[in-house]
Amino acid sequence: MIHKLGYGNWDELKAAFRMSPLFRFDWFVKSRTTQELTRRCDTLIRLVEKENQEYDERERQARKEKKLAAKVWFLNLFELLKLRLSQVL
């Protein structure tokens, strides 16, 4: 809901929780203070950002390994051609 209401609109978020039919019987969520909602949302956002950083790092590492593998393959091919040429001459 933060993406709809905007970050920092905790009172509006609390009102949206109270009015939403999805949380009609969820008294735990409905009884949270705005400060508790703020802390929980901040924690969740930090966790998502950390997860995205880890994903980006894995992607970067995979691209690096793929590039290195292509380079090694090309060097092996070059050495093989050089060996064949030396045998022919």
Image (cartoon, rainbow, N blue to C red):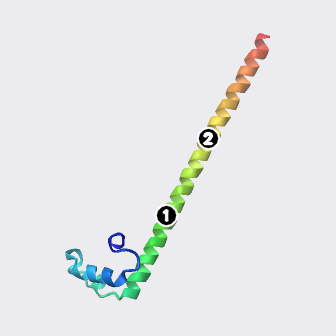
- Please tell me which residue is depicted at 19% across the width and 76% down the height of the picture: 21
Q: Are marks 1 and 2 in contact (CB under 8 Å)?
A: no
Q: Position of residue 32 (x, y in %)?
A: 33, 87
Total residue callouts? 2
Eyeballing the image, is 41 above or below 84? below
Element assignment for label 1: helix
Q: Nearer the viewer, residue 39 or 73?
A: 39
Q: Which quadrant holds the N terminus? A: bottom left
Q: Position of residue 16 (x, y in %)?
A: 27, 79
Mark 2 is on which residue type?
Answer: Lys
Residue 2 picture quarter: bottom left
Mark 1 is on which residue type?
Answer: Glu
Element assignment for label 2: helix
Q: Nearer the viewer, residue 5 or 44?
A: 5
On screen, residue 1 versus residue 7, left or right, reads left
- Please tell me which residue is depicted at 53% across the width and 61% down the height of the picture: 53
Q: Nearer the viewer, residue 52 or 16?
A: 16
Q: Earlier in the sequence, mark 1 or mark 2?
A: 1
Residue occupied by mark 2: 67
Q: Position of residue 4 (x, y in %)?
A: 32, 70
> Given the current orientation, which residue lies at the most extreme top position?
89
Residue occupied by mark 1: 51
Q: Position of residue 82 (x, y in %)?
A: 75, 21
- Please tell me which residue is depicted at 55% across the width and 54% down the height of the picture: 58
Residue 33 picture quarter: bottom left
Mark pair 1, 2: CA separation: 24 Å
The residue carrying pointer 2 sits among few (fewer than 14), some (14 to 19) or many (20 or more) residues within 10 Å by Cα, namely few
Residue 40 picture quarter: bottom left
- Please tell me which residue is depicted at 57% across the width and 51% down the height of the picture: 60
